[in-house]
Image: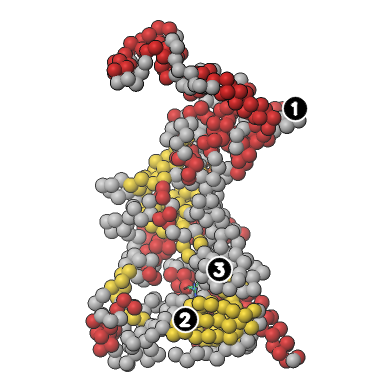
Amino acid sequence: MTTPIATSQTILVVGGGISGMTAALEAAECGKQVILLEKSPTLGGRTALLYRYFPKLCHPVCGLEINLRRLKGNRNVRVLTLSEVSRITGERGNYTVEVTVSPRYVNENCTACGECAKAVAAEVPNPYNYGLDKMKVAYLPHDMAYPLRYVLDPSAVGTEDAGKAKAACKYDAINPDMKHEEMELTVGAIIWATGWQPYDAAKIQPYGYGRYPNVITSLEFERMSDPHGPTGGKILRPSDGKEAKNIAFIQCAGSRDENHLRHCSRICCMASLKQTQYVREACGEEGKSTVYYIDIRAIDRFEDFYQKVRKDPSVRFVKSKVARIAQESRSGDLILHGVDTEGYHRYANNHDLVVLAVGMAPPVKGVDIPAEILADSSGFLEPGSSIFGAGCASGPLDVNRSVQHATAAALRAIQVINKAAGEEASV
Amino acid sequence: MNELNIKYHNNFLMEVEENVEEGKWVKMCMQCGVCSGSCPFGPHWAHPPQELFMMVRAGKRADVLNSDSMWMCTSCYNCVVRCPRKLPITQIMHGLAAYANHLGMAPKTQPTRDFSLLFWKNCTRTGRVNELRLTLGLYFNDGFMAGIRKGWAMRGIGLGLMKAGRLNAFELFKGHVCKDRKGVHAMLKKAAEIEQRRKHPAS
Ligand SMILES: Cc1cc2nc3c(=O)[nH]c(=O)nc-3n(C[C@H](O)[C@H](O)[C@H](O)COP(=O)(O)OP(=O)(O)OC[C@H]3O[C@@H](n4cnc5c(N)ncnc54)[C@H](O)[C@@H]3O)c2cc1C
Ligand code: SF4
Ligand code: SF4
Ligand code: SF4
Ligand code: SF4
């Protein structure tokens, strides 16, 4: 791999989700040189793993496609995948960034024909479906992957499968001898768009995630609802593969909780409201959704969406934070215990599937961000850091707000670059 | 005070903050319901913690202080470990009970309260708990005949304990006293003074 030419006139964007892509494109379309650095083998981030977007319930594919087209048509952005920042030195206007690039074991010749995937035998849990199914060790992350190039999983290297994949490839694209590479970039401004991570649901002990198979996260539910997902769009119970018809959504699972995440994750109320409509789509009138909530936070223009769901007879709302979940061992059904705070009624409600609306945690709390930065009490980037946060790296945001936020970050980075250029010119 | 003010005594939250142990936390409750849903007493008491906290904030002074709900708390701490706002719920429950007792507003025939008073008297008198007297005191709490009946019913256990050397009948008459009984009393007196001073710094 050749190290891209970078100068103090270059903007580095770390994280290739919707926020990073937006920041990179906005700056590039203003004529700036941009390097977009992504840790995983593909751009797109978590939005590529959603079935539909609220509030209009459109498919994320179209938003991503527009951005990918912009990217392909722009010569100012260089994309580095499988890359991570290991160290940043210097200051605003002149940074030196050390980057580690992991091997993909597949080179530019790849046409994404898929023959290598057919040839290999071993499988690994599929992270793009949150481990709900498995994928071959030679794989394409998902249909929207960019670059559209296969990956050979490191676990296959040195095994028979690597040889099989190589033999199956007609384009000489597979190279199991690729090594890790280190490179050093000089850049003038840095935008940090590393997004978010789902809060580890297993830590919410009374809800039994990880112990009860039919307690899943909202992210797993997104994949399940997607016709291209692991269940072909059917809402199936992990315990017995039966179709779930009586589904509970538990809000604030890990958010607004001093024992877990202190902040409100802001999007999970809307995400659950949206997901009740997936239930309706998958099961029709037979599907029943029950939303257990402290209060519904459908911010500003989303109120209309909330009111619409309120009127849906298939959706029931219970104002209560569920105290604990028990499992009926024979049926695998779940019994939710708590108190309905509208009237202080105790309940013990049966459901066949429970979806935890998990909170948004910062990507990797504090540690992974090498240079000196400011983080708030939850670990999100604060404004005023020398590195500009964009999108969910700075706090829980939906896609629309992430994009706005990323555009603002691009503007700030451009100002730094222009200032540096001005200073150079005046010397 | 107008009628509404009398009905919803809105200074009650402040009163609780000043006088009840950990009372300053009551305003932090976000009424999520987890404590009520977690309490093993479930439906068996009038007001679960979350409801009590709402009543405090709504100024329902008499309803709260006359209630026997906070006397029911067994200190299992289920609610405390789950409360998303980390309220020291158990302490507040006991704090409310103690405050109601202090004001003479606690329910008169509440078994937990009866036992607490008996226990306190028993252990502060000599500086140590006299188990035999405490047990018998409890038996006779409901009247003389009830006490005899209870004692008769439990005689097997009593005899067993005696044989095992776990119970000494003479404790009923003389009983052990702690070495420095005066010291214990002085300490309790001092503690009461400090408590008084903390509550009314001016006096
Ligand atoms: C259940 C659920 C449903 C949702 N539904 C909707 C919806 O319907 N509509 C809506 O508007 N929003 C929705 N959201 C919110 C949406 O997912 C986010 O707004 C969006 O993902 C934010 O994009 P991002 O680019 O900031 O972060 P991400 O999507 O997390 O992207 C971050 C990228 O950075 C990369 N990265 C991370 N760390 C590093 C590193 N150290 N170095 C390099 N790269 C790194 C990651 O691999 C990733 O590609 C939903 C969220 C949840 C939880
Ligand atoms: S690596 Fe080769 S076989 Fe595999 S998808 Fe690419 S071109 Fe096809
Ligand atoms: S958005 Fe809703 S579910 Fe998510 S943390 Fe906030 S209140 Fe809870
Ligand atoms: S669990 Fe805590 S915040 Fe929730 S109702 Fe009880 S005291 Fe209030
Ligand atoms: S500590 Fe008291 S109030 Fe809390 S759950 Fe246990 S019994 Fe109920």
- Name the residue type under label 3: Ala
Indicate yes or no: mark 3 CB to ligand 1 under 8 Å. yes
> Would you say residue A147 is visible in this rendering?
no
Q: On what subunit does the disc labeled 1 rest?
A: B
Depth check: A143 or A205 in front? A205
| Helix, strand or loop under label 3 | helix
Which kind of residue does numbered mark 2 sit on?
Thr
Question: What residue would you read off at disc 1?
Answer: B203
Crowding around mark 1 (Cα neighbors within 10 Å: few <14, some 14 to 19, many 20+) is few
User: Which residue corresponds to mark 2?
Assistant: A100
What is the spatial separation of the Cα atoms under label 2 and label 1, in whole angstroms?
A: 70 Å
| Tag nearer the camera, 2 or 3 | 2
Question: In percent of the image, x 41 and y 48: which residue is there?
Answer: A206
- Element type at marker 2? strand
Outermost residue, top side: B145
Q: Nearer the viewer, residue A223 or A302?
A: A223
Q: What residue does disc 3 label?
A: A393
Coordinates of residue A295 in the picture (x, y in percent) = 55, 49
Residues at discs 2 and 3 both on one chain:
yes
Q: Quadrant of residue A282?
A: bottom left
The residue at the point 64 percent across, 70 percent down is A385
**Would you place residue A221 above or below residue B186 in this image?**
below
Dot 2 and dot 1 residues touching (CB under 8 Å): no
Q: Is residue A110 above or below residue B133?
A: below
The three-letter code of the residue at mark 1 reads: Ser
Q: Is residue B9 above or below residue A169?
A: above
Residue A98 as seen in the image, left or right of residue A108: right
Check the picture and name the quadrant holding the N terminus of chain B.
top right
Q: Foreground residue, A318 or B38?
A: B38
**How far apart in space, not on screen, are marks 3 and 1 (Cα)?**
55 Å
In the picture, the disc for residue A379 is: none
